[in-house]
Amino acid sequence: MKKQKNTRILIIFIAGIGDVILFTPVLNGLMKHYKDCEISVIVPPELASCAGKIPCFNDVVISETSGEHGLLKRIIQLAGLCIFVLKKNFDIVITPLAVNCATASLISRLSRAETKIGYTGSNESRTPFTESINIMPFEHDMIQNLKVLERLHISPPDKKMEFYISDTDREDAAVFLKDNGISDKDTLVAFHPVTYDRKGYNRNWPADKYAGLGRRICREYGAKIIILGSAGERKAAEEIKAVIGDRAIVQSGKTSIHAAAATLERCKLLVCNDSSIMHIGAAIGVPMVAIWGPTDPRRRGHSGRDQVVIRKELPCSPCRESLKNCETRECLTQIPVEEVFESCSEILSGKREKQITRDADFSDASR
C-alpha cells in the first residue's frame, strides 16, 4: 500500500491490557509511516482508561457487546458500532492477534476498508480479512503482531513496548506512598499475586508462598512490599499482608492502574504471575521475577537482563485444559519459595550478571 496522508485506521481491540502493550510497537510503526493518519480503536469498558491515554488514538469507542450485558443492550451497542464504522469509511481495519470474537468479525465484514488485516487458525477457510495472518502456536505474540506491519509493507520499528503514565498518575502514586509511610529511602518490592483470565485459567502461585517470600525479602533486605491488584483482588492481598506484617502495604484497588504503574517505577523489583501487571512492568523496565504456570512464556513472556522467568516443565505444560478444572495445579505448587527468592536476591543484591529464562526461549521478543 502506498504511503498517503489522512489514512483512516480502525483497530478492533476487544482484549486485555497486556494485549494492548504487546501491540504498541505496531502502533509506533503505523504512526511513523502514516504521518497524518487518524486511528480509531474499539475497546471493552475495562480498557477505556488505558486506551484514552495512548496519544495516537483519535477516537476511543467503547464496546459493551460481551455476553455479560443484556441482549437488548448488546444489540443497541452493536448497531451503534456498525453505524460508526460505516460513517468513518476506514481505509484499514486491523483485528489484532488476541481478538477472537463475533463482534470483531462482523465489524470487519461490514467495513468498506480496502485493507482488512487479521489472524486465522490453520483450519479457517472463510474470513472477513483481505490479509490473513496464520496464527503460530509457539511464536511470541509481539513477533506475530509485527506481521501486521509486514502486510502493510512497513519496516518494523524497534520492539520497545510502551505504557503511558501521566504526571497526574505519578502524583497520585506519590500521595499513596507518602500516606502509607514510604519514603524515597525505602527499598520497595512489588507483588502482584492474584491473576485470572477470561478463559478461566488460575495462574496464581499459592498465596502462602507469596507471603513466605515477602517475609524473607523484608527480613533479609529490609524492604517494604507493595501488593498491587484490582479491587476484586484486595481480599487476597490483605490475607498476604496479614502474614508478612506491617512492612506490607496493599495498593489493590486503592488507586488507578496507571498510578499503580507509577508506583512500579519506584520499585527495585516486581514479583508477579503472568498478568497485565507483568506486561506493564516489562514496558516500563522494572526488574522482574515472573512465575508462570499454565500459560506459555514462549508466547507472552519477556526476556532481558533483569527479567527472570520461573516455571516447571511438566508433560501437560503449557496447559491443554482450563486450570480451573485441574486438581493438582502442580505447575504452580511445585515452584518452591527458595527458588523464587534466589532469583529475587540476585536482583536485589545487584549480583545478577546475565539473562535467565528457564524452560523457554523467546529472546527474539526482548525489548
Image (spheres, rainbow, N blue to C red):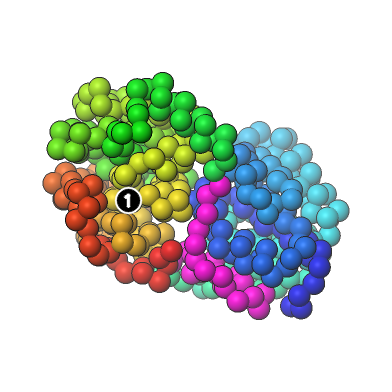
Residue 259 lies, in percent from the top left, at 49, 35
The residue pinned by badge 1 equals 288
Of helix, strand and loop, which one carries label 1?
strand
> Does the magenta segment cover residue 146?
yes
Residue 326 lies, in percent from the top left, at 28, 46
Relative to residue 170, is residue 35 depicted above or below? Answer: below
Q: Is residue 367 left or right of residue 97?
A: left
Whether residue 358 appears in this view of the structure is no
Pick the front one: 366 or 242? 366
The image quadrant that residue 365 belongs to is: bottom left
Q: Is residue 268 left or right of residue 154?
A: left
Residue density around tag 1, few if under 14, some if 14–19, many if 20 or more, within 10 Å: many
Q: Is residue 178 left or right of residue 109?
A: left
The image quadrant that residue 217 belongs to is: top left
Residue 248 lies, in percent from the top left, at 28, 28
Q: Amino acid at mark 1?
A: Met
Q: Which residues are magenta?
A: 140-164
Residue drawn at x 47%, y 26% is 175
The image quadrant that residue 99 belongs to is: bottom right
Relative to residue 63, is residue 121 depicted above or below? Answer: below
Quadrant location of the C terminus?
bottom left
> Does the magenta segment cover residue 12?
no
Please name the predominant secondary structure of the magenta segment in the image: loop
Residue drawn at x 23%, y 47% is 348
Residue drawn at x 83%, y 55% is 88
Q: Is residue 125 left or right of residue 73?
A: left
